[in-house]
Amino acid sequence: MKISSQSLLLAALSCGYGVNAETQKYCTEDDPNVCFSIAVPSSSANSGSGNIYFQISAPTTYQWVALGTGSRMTGSNIFLVYQDGSGNLTVSPRLGTQYAEPRLDTSSTAAKLTLLAGSGVQDGKMIANIRCANCETWSGGSMSLTSSANWISAWKRGSSLSTKAKDASISKHDNTDRFQLDMSTASISSDSNPFLRDSTAGSGSGSGTGTGTGTGTGTGSGSGSNTGSGFTQEEGSLTSTTVLVAHGIIMALVMAILYPLGSLLMPLLGNWKVHAAWQTMSFILMWVGFGIGVKCALDREALFKQTHTIMGTVVVCLMFIQPILGFAHHRHFVAHQSRGMVSYVHIWYGRALLVLGVVNGGLGLQLSDERDSLKIAYSVVAAIVFFLYFAAKLWSTFQKKQRGVPKQVNSPRSRSSVDHPRRPYQEGKRRDAAASGAKGCQSVMHDWSSAGILKTSQLNDLHLSWPCTSSSTAASPPPLPSVNPVNCAPHKHLKMLASVARASGARKAVASVSRLAQTQMRTFIAPTVTRRADFVQELYLKELKAYKPAPIKDSDAAGHVSTFNLPKTPKSPEETDLASSLKEYESMAVEVEGQAAAGAGQPAAVVEDWLVEEEEDDAHHGH
């Protein structure tokens, strides 16, 4: 079959057009000087495997540039390019592991890279023309050569690494980018280097090993449009390193410094308002840092896929309960003036979350592969803060023992009857209550004495055993650390007070003390009136419950009850005497009024008739 020269010319032109026009080029928006070009031979696209070609271009002021396959760094197949110090480039195949420095991939599935002709340092640029023989699959995933594929990139500005070592250590990137490419739009007909403008130009040719290193010199350059039609930049690109650093700084500051210092404000200052304000500020700042961390994790598709993100979410969500426990602890302390079960839950629950938060901060530094100096600094600061925290707690406990604070008891009534100067801000209230209690004690004893309940000797004994001041004025009461209306009870004369309470005048004394027991106390939200324990009533009830009557004996009545003796029988009158008495009565003369005077010859006395009306004197009225 004869082929005309015109047909051969058309075929050559079409082939040349395909090589140059179908290579897709992409330059990052953040730095247009960083560009990537990709080409897929038609033979590789038809078979689903084979060679693909890509070019990496960046200024020589960059320390390194990397291109990778995949949607995120974890598990990505990365192609790292940096200068070797002799005018050529080094290509290193690496595998992304979490969000740390990618390590050299030496496995059987490592990318087989070859540095082609046209690569090197030219006109202030690093240009790497690379052929990959097995980039469609790797240990972390796979990529289609005929449909859309995900790509990521990163770069770092700085001085040249100047090394040919493929496992050279690199610093963290300055910025990242990710995009998608429809691989069908990057198809070329020839399985050869598509980035040489003129294969005859230049005197050198690329060479390299199967593991991806090589050097080359020449005058070739890449071709293709600056904005390939098959590229699509993904929305919501990876958050910058600055945002990730902000997350780390905020969370480390909250968990390792702010929360522990806020807890120290109670034993150091004794002001619950300052403590609550400080911890509220830390609580809000914690949620801000958590939100930034969630954004970073979502952009990198690492949320709930790493220990750091899982533990951090759990700790922050559990911390939401801590303010509720703190409020409950405050209400309990105001009502009982002592700690309760909710108080210890609030304290130890917060301490456990702080320890977990600090440990999770270390996991975050490890995940981001920060330098060792930063990890050591974080550990030292956390250790110092926690040492200060426990030292302050021990100092506070020692101070309480020095002041002679009595130990807490389990009974609520017993707790209410014992003075607990646990916080400095309560000293003023306690002293006012002490002065009021001293006056109350004197008033009660005065009422008992006035009512006749106590004798003078008993009142003197009660003065000695009752821990109240003898002053009756409230102008300037002396500071009595143990005086309080709720603990103003005689401990040595319980039996005497029990007998006093059973007396007829005990009601007046109980009423007097009951009026003192009603105090207005300030709570967290609004003032409410609470009733303190009435010590006289409690003492009275206690004595009644403990009273056991002694058994009655026959000898108990001796000396208290007189012996009953029958009275003497009266003598009955004799009958003879009765007869003589009657005879004597009959012989007695009867005396009649006026009869004795008539018998003596004297005129009888005129008996005035009171019923006769007196005659009126008419002559007298005539005048």
Image (spheres, rainbow, N blue to C red):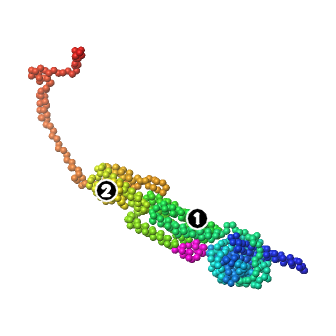
The amino acid pointed to by label 2 is Ser
**Disc assigned to residue 570:** none
Q: CA distance from mark 2 to mark 1?
A: 60 Å
Which residue does the image show at 54% across and 71% down from the upper left? 359
Question: Magenta span: helix, strand or loop, mainly?
Answer: helix
136 vs 262, left or right, is right
186 or 380: nearer the viewer: 380
Q: Secondary structure at mark 2?
A: loop
Where is residue 404 shown, x and y percent of the image?
Answer: 38, 65
Residue range highlighted in magenta? 362-380
**Residue corresponding to mark 2:** 470
Where is residue 323 shown, x and y percent of the image?
Answer: 52, 61
The amino acid pointed to by label 1 is Val
Instruction: Give neighbour class at mark 2: few <14, some 14-19, many 20+ (Cα, 10 Å).
Output: few
Whether residue 108 appears in this view of the structure is no
Where is residue 576 shown, x and y percent of the image?
Answer: 12, 35
